[in-house]
Image (tube, coloured by chain):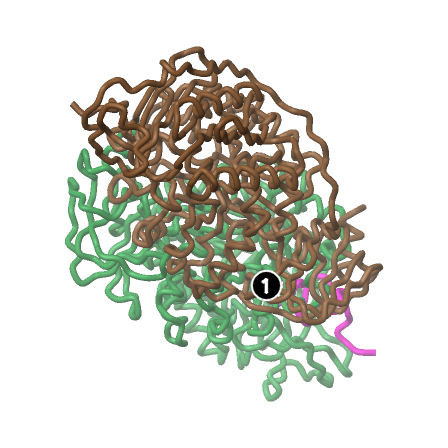
Chain colours: A brown, B green
């Protein structure tokens, strides 16, 4: 009997599989370091004690910490399949992620969720999924699927499902929309998403059962939400970077309510900057005690999701552990998952996944702006996903306006043969060329921005030809990253994806673009985030929560 | 729809039922105080905000804290029925207890559990039960029932059941006894009980799934258990008082892992000293920051048991709250349960509960000690339930030995017509008279100690006549507290029980006894606690875990 053998080993009556000697071991229960030999058997921690093992590691001078946990991520945003994502983040010490397959579900419904769940098999790290609650993001958004409480119900008890993903439909919650409340009743773990929500409305949102938030951008906002009982996931993604503003929230009394989350992080960011390890480095850089940062990245996240089998290296828990040089530098030296060292895993091939794709590229005539006058212009905000709603007077033939940095943005439905929509955006700084992508949260229609109509159309045509891609067009030259899993993820190894992203970066830099143009582009359609967005129907004022025209009356 | 109305009220669109104004409100999420108006509707907290209510309280100068939670208690030890217990402890600000009906289950099996569960109905506070795992306490103990995993299984999903109660069978866990492991698989919440367990064996005990301990008596012991991942319930009962020794364990980083528990607390202690309020006063008296003590008594306990609906006064949680004068004095001014003020509730009558009772009082001949020589003597330890194993040379006719304070202790089976057992005990200090009781953990056989054989027999006879009681005999005078619920609890109101306990105290004091002789007496048979105990079979060495003779060879 397996438990019998484990108990014998824990009591020191039979040898352990592995013993780690002479390291300092982080213990989140005391937020401090322990010395001793850590023993592991059958993938589980036996404990710290006077153990001997079949394999022994001498880790003098090193530190051992529990495997890192990302409390909220959309794996699709990495552009990698879950298996490739895992192969990449495990190098950074991540051994568990709590993922919301919200993007692929918006594109392909339960078939998309099944694709993601199937990928748990044979994946290095443990992926715990939350059920996407907002497919589509709002009732008005037309995506590839509509998921009701009834559609989600069969998934509740499935292995690898931990609860409900971020409930972005704040108005639906506050007005007690029955279809929303039905979803909230499905699970006891329920993640929230309520940027800038405060006061009585925040009380109501929490009363309805939402328990966490990863959208705080200001310290006062995070403070209020934490006081009212929410877990605060401090986010550091490719463009959403909140650690510098929020880390002051974390004190010893509060650390168990604070976690790290990457939310949306592209493969190249993960390769170059890291994952939760990077969050720890940054938090410590901003003055947080390393032990508190480590607690956030391990036990806090495990307990928030009721993952009582991990988050600490105490008896009976998963032997997911990371060997680092020093808690301040935090360079990962070795990673063990369920007691097994992870050394250069090879990519596991994933077949492509092509859900329905019915986009028709626009003609030059389709994307003309024929009026002139005072317009609404989407204003990018550096390092944030919210936008500003700007006003500019536009003259005939005045777009592109390089002086005022106003470019045309075009959205084509991915699902229906309907006319495209046209808007204006400030902040991309393109001087020539165009970019287009099949990633645009959350409906994932085709979105493009560019310095000329011709290049915009070329870029969209290339996305359609690939049935999903990220494309940069400069003149006639095209740089393409095909996204052959639902137009969101690539089946290529992460090294190849990163290389293509570098090519795209080089191309767009030469076009004058800001960093990460595709990331900013991908959020322009997200109607649940303030202030002005663009969907396949046209401009959307997310503060008034309604479609608005390009031209002011 | 109820939730719809609650959401409206939380948003301030319709009035709340009740609003508490001008108090300082304790927020365990920040371990600090907030100002503002706290609104309540339908028994639930709406939040702190700018609310108005149908009823409003002006609490200027007062403090509001969430209702207090006892993390581990045996209600039977109060000598009160659950309803009367609730009526008493609610006066002290307790609104939730996590109770293990271990005593009544040992006496009456599932019928005893049903009696306790039925009492949840119409009870003021919320009683969450844990399933008793050790009935009998050890396979050798003969009590009134044997509860296997199969017997417990039907209770797992019942309303009011929170998990598994203290697993006292440490050897059974360590040796992977299949009947013990089967019980551990029943629930995901599992309380431990492992006095002085340390090192590798402690690792094994935790690996098997035990998550908490309330038996720590030393700071090093508590520190080791906390480090290995256990929740530490710091106990303050009628005689088991660990706060002074353990409170140094609690720091801001660790407070979420530390709770208060009363374990065994008689009605008179509850009336005179208090309950969890007393724990807070004592902890603060020993130097703990009041806010940390309050966290332990509220959110820590709620989270340990997954009671996400209480432990803080944040939106959607139970409006269980206590108005106090000052967090240091901690005098309770008002108590609200589910938003309703509790004012002088009247006793709810409970019919008596008489399970099987087959005790035969011994004759003078039955309790003779006919040998002399070197004997094992149970040594009481002041304010602790463990004992010492002493050695004394006893001469013919040398008992009682008032000079060396060695008295005779007698145990008669409550369940079987078998011969009684005889032992010797040091520490009661009786100079005359005898005490007997139908409470003796955990089999609850009849136990008596006295200064003369005649009075011992008289006392036992009175217990049998009452089918359960606490009795003090001095000469021919008898003082009796009848225990008409399984020989453990009284159906009388707590005021009457307390008055009888005072009579017993006065009588035993006149007999020269130490304080709380019945409490010490009741633990003498508990074979899971070190070092020397007495059962209906005779002396038991709980360190060697075997029966031992009175006389040394």
Is residue B533 visible in the rendered image? The answer is no
Q: Residue at x 36, y 61 (%)?
A: B31
Q: Which residue is mark 1?
A: A27
Say if B145 sits above or below B267 in the image.
above
Image coords of residue A446 (percent x, y)? 46, 23
Give the side of residue A429 with respect to residue B343, left or right: right
Q: Position of residue B508 (x, y in %)?
A: 47, 74
Examine the rendering and report whether any part of residue B225 can be seen. Answer: yes
Q: Could you classify mark 1 by the number of other residues whose Cα lies within 10 Å: few (under 14), some (14-19), or many (20 or more)?
A: many
Residue A505 location (% of width, % of height): 52, 41
Report which quarter residue A372 is drawn in: top left
Between B99 and A455, the one lying in front of the other is A455
In this view, the residue in front, B16 or A473, is: A473
Q: Secondary structure at mark 1?
A: strand
Q: Position of residue A126 (x, y in %)?
A: 64, 42
Residue B282 vs residue B40, the one in the foreground:
B40
Is B537 colored magenta in this rendering? yes
Whether residue B430 sits left or right of residue A244 in the image: it is right
Dot 1 falls on which chain? A
Q: Residue furthest front?
A: A475
* Residues in magenta, as a range: B524-553
Image quadrant containing the C terminus of chain A: top left
Counting labels gives 1
Instruction: Give the residue at x 26% y 61%.
Output: B324
Q: Is residue A354 above or below residue A493?
A: above
Write the residue at 55% across / 52% down: A273
Q: Quadrant of residue B317?
A: top left
Question: Is A446 left or right of B230, judged from the image as shown?
Answer: left
């Amino acid at each position: 009997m397996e438990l019998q053998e484990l108990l014998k080993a824990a009591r020191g009556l039979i040898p352990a599989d592995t013993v780690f000697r002479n390291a300092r071991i982080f213990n989140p229960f005391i937020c401090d370091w322990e010395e001793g030999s850590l023993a592991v058997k059958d993938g589980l921690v036996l404990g710290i004690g006077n153990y001997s093992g079949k394999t022994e590691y001498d880790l003098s001078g090193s530190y051992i910490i529990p495997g890192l946990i990302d409390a909220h991520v959309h794996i699709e945003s990495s552009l990698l399949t879950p298996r490739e994502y895992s192969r990449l983040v495990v190098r950074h010490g991540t051994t568990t992620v709590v993922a919301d397959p919200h993007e692929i579900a918006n594109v392909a419904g339960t078939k998309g969720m099944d694709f993601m769940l199937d990928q748990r098999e044979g994946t290095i790290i443990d992926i715990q999924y939350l059920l996407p609650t907002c497919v589509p993001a709002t009732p008005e958004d037309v995506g590839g699927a509509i998921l009701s409480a009834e559609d989600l119900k069969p998934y509740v008890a499935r292995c690898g499902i931990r609860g409900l993903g971020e409930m972005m439909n704040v108005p639906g919650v506050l007005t007690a929309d029955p279809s929303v409340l039905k979803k909230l009743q499905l699970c006891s773990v329920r993640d929230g998403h309520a940027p800038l929500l405060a006061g009585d409305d925040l009380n109501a949102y929490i009363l309805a059962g939402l328990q966490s938030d990863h959208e705080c951008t200001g310290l006062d906002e995070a403070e209020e939400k934490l006081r009212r009982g929410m877990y605060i996931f401090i986010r550091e993604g490719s463009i959403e970077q909140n650690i510098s503003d929020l880390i002051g929230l974390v004190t010893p009394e509060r650390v168990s309510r604070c976690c790290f989350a990457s939310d949306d992080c592209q493969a190249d960011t993960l390769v170059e900057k890291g994952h939760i390890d990077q969050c720890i480095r940054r938090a410590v850089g901003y003055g947080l005690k390393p032990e508190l940062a480590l607690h956030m990245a391990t036990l806090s996240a495990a307990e928030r999701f009721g993952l009582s089998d991990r988050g600490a290296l105490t008896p009976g828990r998963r032997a997911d552990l990371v060997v680092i040089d020093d808690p301040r530098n935090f360079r990962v030296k070795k990673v063990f998952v369920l007691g097994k060292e992870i050394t250069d895993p090879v990519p596991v091939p994933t077949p492509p996944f092509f859900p329905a794709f019915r986009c028709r590229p626009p003609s030059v005539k389709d994307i003309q702006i024929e009026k002139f006058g005072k317009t609404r212009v989407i204003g990018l905000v550096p390092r944030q996903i919210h936008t500003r709603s700007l006003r500019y007077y536009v003259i005939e033939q005045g777009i592109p306006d390089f002086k005022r940095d106003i470019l045309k943005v075009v959205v084509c439905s991915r699902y229906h043969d309907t006319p495209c929509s046209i808007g204006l955006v400030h902040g991309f700084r393109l001087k020539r060329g165009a970019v287009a992508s099949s990633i645009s949260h959350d409906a994932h229609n085709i979105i493009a921005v560019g310095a000329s109509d011709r290049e915009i159309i070329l870029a969209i045509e290339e996305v359609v030809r690939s049935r999903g891609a990220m494309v940069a067009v400069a003149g006639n030259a095209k740089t393409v990253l095909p996204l052959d899993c639902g137009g969101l993820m690539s089946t290529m190894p992460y090294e190849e994806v990163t290389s293509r992203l570098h090519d795209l970066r080089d191309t767009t830099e030469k076009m004058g673009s800001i960093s990460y143009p595709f990331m900013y582009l991908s959020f322009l359609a997200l109607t649940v985030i303030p202030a002005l967005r663009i969907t396949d129907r046209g401009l959307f004022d997310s503060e008034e929560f309604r479609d608005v025209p390009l031209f002011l009356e």
